[in-house]
Amino acid sequence: MSVLYYFAADIPLEEQPNPYICLLSVNQALERGIELDLEMLEGIDRDKPETVLYCESKEKFAYPNFFSIQKEDVYEDIGTKKMFCIKMEWDFAEDTAPVVLDYIRRQMETCTELEIWSIWLGSEEGVPQQMKKPVYSIDELSVNILREFYLQEGDYRCMVVR
C-alpha cells in the first residue's frame, strides 16, 4: 500500500519531471564516472537507453516530479470525476514546497479549478460519498496550507483551488 498524490482538472495539466533525474545507458553512466555493479548488470545491453536511473544526490532526488497518469491505469477509484490527472511524487519539504506552489499557480493560469488529492491506495474504506473538500483561492494558497494538507491523516483527502 502507498499514498498517491495527484492533481485533477478538466483540461490537460503540464508535466514537469524532476530536472535532476536522468535515464542513461550503462555506457553513458560509465562515461560520466558513475560507479555501477557490473556483475549485477551482466547480460544487459550496455547501449540500451534508459537503463540506469541517475540523480546526483538524495536531496535532489526528492525534488517534486509531476507526470500524467490515466485513471484507468490505477487499480481502484481514485476519487475525482475530472478527466485529466497529474501524479505528484514529492515528500513535503520546506525548501521544495515553493516549487509545488509555483506549479499550481502555473496550472491555474489555464484552468478554473484544480483538485489536489491524497489517497491511500489499497484502503478498504473506498472513497467516502460525502467528503469535505476545503476550497482556496489561488491567492490564499500557501506553503502553510500545503504543509497542513500533506501532513493531515486520512485515507482520502482533497482540497480545491479556484
Image (spheres, rainbow, N blue to C red):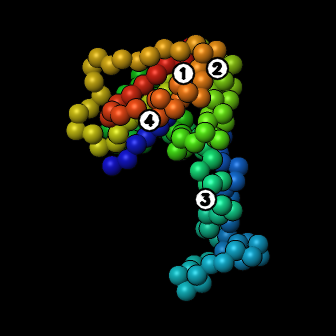
- Please report the residue visible at 47 percent of the width from the left and 29 percent of the height from the top: 148
Real-space CA distance between mark 2 and mark 1, rounded to the nearest whole angstrom: 7 Å
Q: In the rendering, at what x and y percent does residue 59 appear?
A: 63, 54
- Please report the residue visible at 44 percent of the width from the left and 16 percent of the height from the top: 134
Which label sits on residue 114? Answer: 1
Total numbered badges shown on the rendered structure: 4
- In this rendering, the answer to whether 49 lies above or below 86 is below
Q: Which residue is mark 4?
A: 151
Real-space CA distance between mark 3 and mark 2, rounded to the nearest whole angstrom: 30 Å
> Which of pointers 2 and 1 lies earlier in the amino acid sequence?
2
Q: Which residue is mark 3?
A: 58
Q: In the rendering, at what x and y percent does residue 27 appear?
A: 71, 76
Q: Amino acid at mark 4?
A: Leu
SS label for mark 3: helix
Real-space CA distance between mark 1 and mark 3, rounded to the nearest whole angstrom: 30 Å
* Crowd class of label 3 (few under 14; some 14 to 19; many from 20; radius 10 Å): few
Q: Amino acid at mark 3?
A: Lys
SS label for mark 2: loop
> Which of pointers 1 and 3 lies earlier in the amino acid sequence?
3
User: From the image, which quarter does the C terminus lie in?
Assistant: top right
Real-space CA distance between mark 4 and mark 1, rounded to the nearest whole angstrom: 20 Å
Asked if labels 4 and 2 touch by Cβ distance under 8 angstroms, the answer is no
- Give the mark toward the camera: 4 or 1: 4
